[in-house]
Amino acid sequence: MRAANLQAMARRTRTVAANRLAALVAGFFLLAAIPAAAQQPGDKSSSVSKVVRLNRAPVSKEVLRVKLPKPYETTLPNGLRVLILEDHRFPLVNMNLLILGAGATAEPAELPGLASTTATMLDEGTATRTSKQIAEETEKLGAEISFFAPFGGTTATMSASGLSDNFNDWFALALDELLHPVFPADELAKWKQRAGVRLRQQRSSPQFLARERYSLAVYCANPDEPGTCLPEARVAETSGSIAGMTTERLASWHDARYVPQNGILAIAGDVETKALVAKLTRDLTAWKRTDLVDQPPPATRAVAERHIYLVDRPNSVQTTIWLGNIAIDRRDPDYVPIVVANRIFGGGPAARLFLNLREEKGYSYGVYSGFTAVRYAGPWAASGDVTRDVTDGAMHEFFYEITRLGKEPMPDAELDDGRRAVVAGFALSLEQPERLINYAVDRAIYSLPEDYWDTYPAKIAAVSAADVTRVAAKYLDPAKLQIVAVGEANKVLPVFEKYGAVKLYDTQGKPENPPATGGAAANPAGPAAKEPEVITIKVPVTHPAPAATAAVPATTATPASQAGGVRRIRVSSGVMQAKIINHVAPIYPREARTEHIQGTVKLRAIVSTEGAIQSLEVVSGPPELISAATDAVRQWTYQPTLLNGEPVEVETYIDVIFVLG
Amino acid sequence: MKPARTPKPLEFPIEQHKLPNGLRVVFSVDHSAPVFGIAVTYDVGSRNERPGRTGFAHLFEHMMFQGSENVGKGEHFILILNNGGGMNGTTNEDRTNYFEQLPANQLDLALFLESDRMRALAVNQANLDNQRKAVKEERRLGIDNQPYGATDEALSDILYDNFAYKHSVIGSMADLDAASVDDVKDFFRLYYAPNNAVLTLVGDFNPSEALAKITKYFGGLAAQPTPPRPDLSEPPQTAERRRRMDDTFAETPRLDELFKASPGEQPDWFTVLTISAVLGGGQSSRLYQRLVKEKELAVNVETDLENRPGPSPFQIEVSLRPGADFAAVEQIVQEELDRLQKEPVAAWELEKVRLTSRRERAERLRSSLGRAFVIGEYTAKFSDPELINTYEKRLDAVTPEDVERAARKYLTVNQRCIIETYPKQAAPGGAQ
């Protein structure tokens, strides 16, 4: 559910920064140094940062000791765990409910999106309220209630916030949506339309494409075989799964999975604990415990050898690059050392990746690293969008930084800065009760000890340079990096080939052939790559299909049909003739020749996105010649046709003329 | 009409000072967490630029992080981030601000950094050349390479006649190329002066100690001549304006409708803010229900009213479904605008506006940094930090009669500006 936002100042102001570039990081983060000349592979990087430290500013070396307040904790009779943190400075209440086992990693493989769709549809109708009524009632109270279960997640979450003086009213609304959703068919149909648009829009986003390909790379034993993929690999619905969502499926998922014994309810703000516990006990009796035990998500594993995947996105002015591998889950003892190592390596604008690739070299507006340590082990990866023409230099620097993190002991000052940065930030969270309670939620989800956060600063302070080198060498081994890039393959494929064999994909996720030598893909307006041998076949210039005259490379942009999400366009036969790669001459049938049968076999062909003949339909022609025509044309292959950088199916007409004499 | 509930309004303590050199200082003390937020807001934005010299205000946002006499290049953010803080800076048409949040024991650090760059920013040819390139990069990647980038730039161009708000914040590359170091130094001296700045400090500090520190760090800066006040008036618009844009990157069409509302903080401004929420705030809003849910012509609707010292822009933005008809969408938008002129808004709609605003403000202002930002804005743009404490009362005062009157005054057909953005279908040459 979209946030209502009435506050003019909280909206984007028409600043340049807010306009597009990482809107919250205006100012300094928009700086780019003058791009340096691209470095040659094998050069040592001179990564002495251009940042100048004069050390004249007065800095207090004392790190404020901060005692994080602990919430009240209890478990209701139905098994629901409850955490309550009082904060009376503002008349607000924040409420989060996490339900383990209702997330995407538990959904069936044949219906990706079941978890997130169910969550999204909870506020589209209950037994007593329509979607519109829910929206009106919620917003009239000034509250905001939303449900989500993102891909890759293990939980479904309800997130609600509102004023404390009408808390009872919006709490009741949230409870109604949680317990009595009906998933109305008409609202579901509308959701499907919106979701279909979103699926389309996503495929033009390089960040989405990178995430999709990266998830396949690290969560599938064989990324080209969906059957070998773990549920963690899914990042979006398919058009098929959108079509497959029904009221019944959503309702049964909800009935089975939205159960209190797997839930954690965290409430922070202007509430009174005792009264609230009594209310929750009363109001939530209706939510019945079941036998469902939350299963942990399937275990993941690091990939044993380096792989490189490039998604070809023509016209990209940037190359999006990810490099990393599966690392740890949240409970792993290496968590704390990785927090420190990651912070120094790429955890922000004061980190090595940023200072090198952005500040010093000017390759990018932002290069960072991050790791996913949840109930399963996710990747630790460096990533960024670099200007296309410096992809080579950027890859060099990525490898330089990754290698030295695992080899060279970290200097004391740098290590000290990193440890202090992690711990000193705790003070700022004291203003935000919602952040404070999340520390306790983490403890609950991951079964961490009660004093976990009290001992955390000391653990961070104890991380040594040797610890950093060890975890980097173990989890960011250059020889085992999974590398995913999205960009203009014509220009950047050779860069990635320097690091190993590259698997190439198009933006639909299908494997693609490397660009033809010479770099340019087929140009229907230009001369044919080679003249096809035409002996007994003549292809007429005009035909009944709605393409224009042959002089114009008449690729009509309007799709003839859209089968399964792939676009299809009509192309004139003249244009298609110029794109033929493999032309097979038909053989004149002996009987037809003997009986002087001549004529034209008209075929309607659908050419697949790979350029193969997908289907042939006989429009007309002498019956004696049809087989000879179809036998030959069936084997023809064309250069793939791209429209806006995306491969399309082509509908075209082919006349096979049999002439004697 | 009184709202159904009248809970205690949000109120924050405000203490004002002014140094002899003109630096305005605003304090708001809050000892509940050992942190503070500080914002230095300069009364300069793109509206202060003159033809031939656009883009300077935004350029300065970049230059302010290049280092000053006692702070090295890039050192500012490293010091803040490595000591547990957060920081940022923003430029818009009316003001430029720089802000940090830090643990309470780092007040000297923040004041040192802000005063050093106010006093002695390193304005030299090398930095200027550097940042010109950076701004061009930014423009290329952030506007030229983004869907609706060109449309967003066109919004102010179509809406305003007065050069002040008409031209874009990022400015023209030709103007920046033509700028000399002396031009830039003059701009800095005039606008980045203590008498043109507001220092706002919110959080856990002792006011008299803080004032002494501020005097120590900022007191030695010399006041500069008062910068000229820009004329922000707009001639009345007497006829509708329309523009069509074709966008290389957009996947879906977009409709933008804009109007000039009153300057910010006036009673009429709160009325138009109410209208903005009624039309496009949340899923219960009129345009969302009609365009997204009922007719399914759109996938999203947003409305926005900015808060400026001059006529403030009110915008309706509709993301159309592919293939949806612009005329049909525009008709529905117009029907709703007409309705506002003739029919009183419902009681529940006013209630929604008031309570949602209350919640959103509370969430925004819960952090000391949020408060420093907002109080600094009020002081720089409207010369009154207490506006933060009277906001709710003024919003609650809006009546249904006010809404009808404001709709007739500001939102007529002749006053509207419409931009239709179409995804560019690739020419046949686009098929490769």
Image (tube, rainbow, N blue to C red):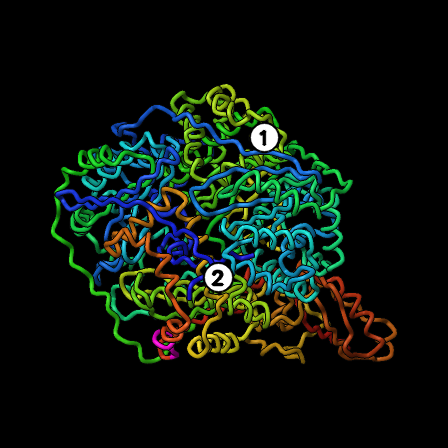
Q: Which residue type does callout 2 highlight?
A: Lys
- Taking the spot 44% from the left edge, 32% from the top edge, the residue there is A426
Q: Nearer the viewer, residue A616 or A480?
A: A480
Q: Which mark is residue B287?
A: none
Q: Position of residue B254 (x, y in %)?
A: 48, 67
Q: Find disc 1 in the rendering and name its residue.
A: A479
Q: Find disc 2 in the rendering and name its residue.
A: B352
Magenta stretch, main secondary structure class:
helix
Secondary structure beneath disc 1?
Answer: helix
Q: Nearer the viewer, residue A575 or A584?
A: A575
Secondary structure beneath disc 2?
Answer: helix
- Taking the spot 42% from the left edge, 60% from the top edge, the residue there is B149
Task: Please say if B52 is above or below A25.
Answer: below
Relative to B390, is B119 on the left or the right? left
Point out the stretch of residues depicted in magenta: B408-413
Q: Quadrant of residue A523?
A: bottom right
* Chain containing mark 2: B
Relative to B372, is A256 on the left or the right? right
Task: Please say if B377 is above or below A420.
Answer: below
**Residue A187 part of the magenta segment:** no
Q: How many residues crowd mark 2 within 10 Å: few (<14), some (14–19), many (20+)?
A: many
Relative to B329, is A187 on the left or the right? right
Q: Position of residue B33 (x, y in %)?
A: 39, 35
Q: Which residue type does callout 1 highlight?
A: Ala
Give the CA separation, mark 1 to mark 2. 58 Å
